[in-house]
Amino acid sequence: MSDQAGIATAPHARVENVRLGQRLSPAGGIEILGADLGAPLSPSLKALILKAFLDHRVVVVRDQHLSTEEQYAFTENFGELEEHVGRHSDARYGIVHAVTNLDKQGNPTDALETRGNYFWHTDKSYHALPSLMTMLHAVELPPEGGDTQFANMVLAYERLPEEMKRRIEGLRCVHSWEASRIASGSRPASPEEIKERPPVDHPLVRTHPDTGEKALYMGTHAATIAGTPEAEGKALLAELLAHATQPAFVYTHHWRPGDVVMWDNRALLHRAVANYAMGTHRRVLHRTVVRGTVPV
Ligand code: OGA
Ligand code: MN
């Protein structure tokens, strides 16, 4: 399956078996049913997925059983895969990594070293080139809870009072991996890590490169507002976050075994929810991420 000819001649996942399921919430999310993402992706199925992705921002493909190789190959259809922060590996499939609540011994723990996923954020916004799409594939789920929430930043921007839109126009946020680790109560960054990931700034309101929509772009990695006194910037960011994550703008995903969830980091904030017995039950999701472009 790895050579070009093999991919070209392999049977395509037939789009005629695939259908859009229900919209999952007013804030976003759509189901895709009847797909086999382990098979090479046909142009028509790719187009269907991409349209659903742009229209609904969170795409939930049910009933998948992807190997890491298959998840890698499927993700590659959408762009360049990112390496996970802090893991340098030449192994092609090392880029498919696991998001878990497991400690170094492989046991469930409620004392994770890295807790950032449990705070509203958009992936890798502390990089000059933040993530475009993140994909999680449910491998092991707790019997209850362990949800993921998504907040629609296009809707949140649209519904801001005009006065606030004028106030934030042109502002830029400073996104900092180091500050984010402190804010989330994670293991503090080492001096070497801080040097490797200096803060970057991005527009607080970004324009979606594919749809032209304006969206708030902030979250826990956004520490301050450039050129604004720190306390004032933080207060404004807290006010915007409270507005943007109100229930009307949020879709809560209740995971089912086999789910593949793909989301648009350019238009959403997301977070894991600790609504499960973290110290008791395993939660393991396989993750791949597609690199995005400079936010403008
Ligand atoms: C992520 C993330 C949330 C979750 O993988 O980027 O934030 O619910 N995950 O595990
Ligand atoms: Mn994330």
Image: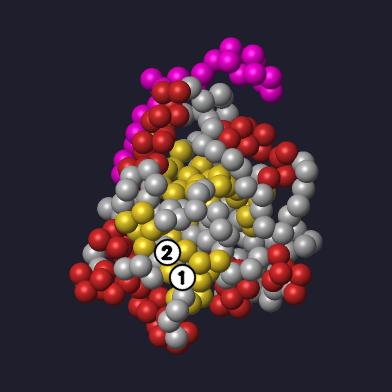
Q: Nearer the viewer, residue 292 or 22?
A: 292
User: What mark, if any, has residue 173 been given in the picture?
Assistant: 1
Q: Quadrant of the N terminus?
A: top right
Query: Residue at label 2?
Result: 203
Q: Is residue 139 visible?
A: no
Q: Residue at x 49, y 60 (%)?
A: 122
**In the current view of this chain or complex, which residue is farthest to the left?**
162
Assess whether residue 11 is covered by the magenta stretch. yes
Q: Earlier in the sequence, mark 2 or mark 1?
A: 1
> Image check: 44 left or right of 124?
left
- What x and y, as percent, mark residue 253? 43, 53
Please, is residue 268 above or below residue 168 in the view? Answer: above
Spatial distance from mark 2 to mark 1, Cα to Cα?
6 Å
- Please say if the residues under marks 2 and 1 sit with CB atoms less than 8 Å apart: yes
Q: In this picture, which residue range is highlighted in magenta? A: 1-23
Please, is residue 85 above or below residue 201 in the view? Answer: above
In the picture, residue 4 is in which quadrant?
top right
Mark 2, residues whose alpha carbon is within 10 Å: few (<14), some, or many (≥20)? many
In the picture, residue 67 is in which quadrant?
top right
